[in-house]
Amino acid sequence: MGSGMNKSNTPGGSFEDRSREACADGRLRGILRDAVRHFSGRRTAAFEGLDVQSLRDAAREVRTRALACLPESLRRFEQKALALGIHVHWARNGSEARDILLRIARDGGVRRIVKGKSMLSEEIGLNHAFEAADIEVTETDLGEFINQLAGDTPSHMIAPSLHHDRRSVAGLFAEHVGETSSGDSPVDDPDAEIREQTAIARRALRRRFLEADMGITGANIAVAETGSLFLVENEGNIRLSTTLPRIHAALVSIEKIVPTLEDAARLMAVLPRSAAGQTLSSYTSVFTGPAREGEIDGAREMHVVLLDNGRSKLLADPVLREILLCLRCSACLNACPVYRTAGGHSYGWVYSGPIGSLLTALDLPEAPKDLAFACTQCRACTDACPVQIDHASLHLHLRERLTREKTPARHIAPAALAAVYARPALYRASAWVARTADPKLSRARRIPVFGRKLSRWAEARELPALRLPFSKRWARLRAVLDSEAAAASVMKNGPKATELRPSQGCERPNPVSEEVSR
Amino acid sequence: MTTHLFIPCLVEQCLPETGEAMARVLARQGCRVELPSGQTCCGQPLYKTGDWTEARRAALYWLDVFEALDGHIVSPSASCVATVRKGYPRIFADDSAALARVATVSAHLFEFTEYLVDVLGVTDTGASLQASAVYHESCQTARALGLRRQPRALLDAVDGLALLPLHGQDECCGFGGTFSFDNPTVSDALLADKLDAVEASGAEAVITAEPSCLLNIRGGLEKRGSRVKTLHIAEVLDSVEEARHNG
């Protein structure tokens, strides 16, 4: 398989439409199943023997406090950064951020850029801006490099080319790198081909690092007290992107600032573990300014672009601001049954999984509108989240937000339902009509809109029947319970002090082995 | 102390025997069981679709029915209890009077297994059921209400019941309320995973404490022509085989 059909996020259509396509891809289903099981297992192992709840509580406290004092922290960060000789830029939105980075590149005579993995840069479509300006951009994270060759967008935050396998990678390398793997791993060394492919990428990328004028990265954490940026990686591509070129520009969203190094350390106790099952990533870099006088390594010129892009508005919402606690570790993606089944591209934009749906609250134009409903409310995400974001409840808040935009006609059905729920006689009457006219719910399938959904539901499940309601059986049951209680009391107080099974006299057929008439 | 039954819509209309089983199990523990008349629905569907103006109307009526009751309120549905306990505070966030009513009633509102174990202090209900079964740990029971220990303790005490391991025991069955109607592809895939695991276990029955999961799983098994029975935990705890009676 060559580069094949490129996999990108297109917000057109619904989550159901996109997931239908994804679910039909058996290869992708298999990849996702294995990958999330692997990631989740590594995450669990990384926290083994630790007081996980305390670590999560500490991390949540740091992030909550960081949001509470964000304006102050941003001011301090800028102050410190400027004192270190870092150029600090402020961007309200993606367009401003792209313009700023383009200007930095032009002012620096930049022809070639190398990039570390940055979801934020994907959020604003940064690469396209450079390509349009005829400046070469190379993604140096291996997963993003593969995606770049294929013209794909990331399908996972930590493993962005998760949707590719070694076959498709071999095809991409053959087509775009001019070198490819030999095709077959020996039986006793199944990962030989992967190592070969990694070596090919390493050779291709090494040249790019050496030729680059500028390196662009994101940042995992920014520290106000020192003006520092924490960057976490496993491949060394960020080290090379930030030390070989003469210019380093970091694109950082404003909510990532924490007050102190101590705060950053608390986050580092959970971030690599949650993201990749590691105590610490292979390379953890803390940047505190450009190379100083006399230093050999490092960019001579360092820029930090602080980007808002909807975050300050979200911060102002007392409920939705919890979304900004996120560390971008992907634990929620790995835990989510919907993500595991449909994959990242089904979400239709740069962010996927539970947090991807919640980040649509940034109200960016390219974000799909229906992701708030792409959730079963199972809460596996919150269990995995290092900062304990209550994703499920936040999804409901986003649904509520959407209902405020409903036309009056769309309120009719919910209002009718509420009216029935609030009137017991109407509730009972409606139920009576339904079970009398259509106990097997066969006619219900002809109701517009709802009927179609019911029919679709019934493709995979036998529909339940509407039965004589519990409340109509209650009087009889009540009488039986009363008489049993009376009998038990008589027996208990009677002459024979026999040990009674509590339900003597009320046996029912075994509900498993016998047919229980329903 | 009276135990008032909070019967979910799905139990009222489709699974009345779950309510009957629960009532009998409670009565056997010495509870004076009552059914508050006029109850309809806690409004969960409206809460889950985000139609909170309408959900509030349903909720205020639910509070009217249940708040003045003396004693305990018990439901065979974790999702319904979670709607009142956790959902009502959200939909009434700006209404301090309603919040106070919710807090008062929540103090004596319980899910069925939670009530038996944590309030009545009972794990052995005297049930016996000669069968092999797996337990589907509903998201609502295990994670929304945090009830993992209680259902397990109750099932472990059922005489003759062989509980087998279930692969992906606490993974979502795919129902998710409106999710299964709005996103049928993923829902069906998750259900298929659950049914595959149930069938692979070799168990004769799958047990759950959540009516919506029950209907989803039972419907799926029946569609497959499976002989595996789907039971609510109340039915299991209500089960007594005469052969097990030795006086």
Image (cartoon, coloured by chain):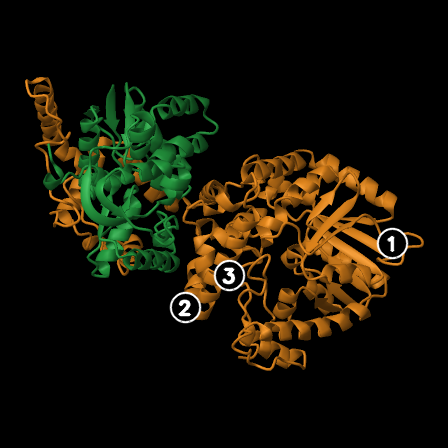
Residue drawn 49% across the image and 43% down it: A383
Q: Amino acid at mark 1?
A: Ala
Q: Residues within 10 Å of mark 1 (few under 14, many from 20)?
A: some
Is A202 left or right of B211, judged from the image as shown?
A: right
The color chain A is rendered in: orange
Farthest right residue in view: A294
Instruction: Say which of A359 and A172 sits in front.
Output: A172
Badges 1 and 2: C-beta atoms under 8 Å apart? no
Please tell me whether residue A394 is drawn above or below residue A252 in the rendered image.
above
Residue A149 placement: quadrant? bottom right
Which residue matches tag 1?
A: A291
Q: Earlier in the sequence, mark 3 or mark 2?
A: 2
User: Do the dots labelled 1 and 2 sit on one chain?
Assistant: yes
Instruction: Say which of A447 and B23 sits in front.
Output: B23
- Eye-nearest disc, 1 or 2: 1
Is B163 left or right of A178, judged from the image as shown?
A: left
Which residue matches tag 2?
A: A24
The green-tinted chain is B
Q: Residues within 10 Å of mark 3 (few under 14, many from 20)?
A: some
Which residue matches tag 3?
A: A35
Residue drawn 37% across the image and 46% down it: A409
Give me the chain letter of mark 1.
A
Instruction: Say which of A399 and A323 sits in front.
Output: A323
Please tell me whether residue A272 is drawn above or below residue A23 in the rendered image.
above
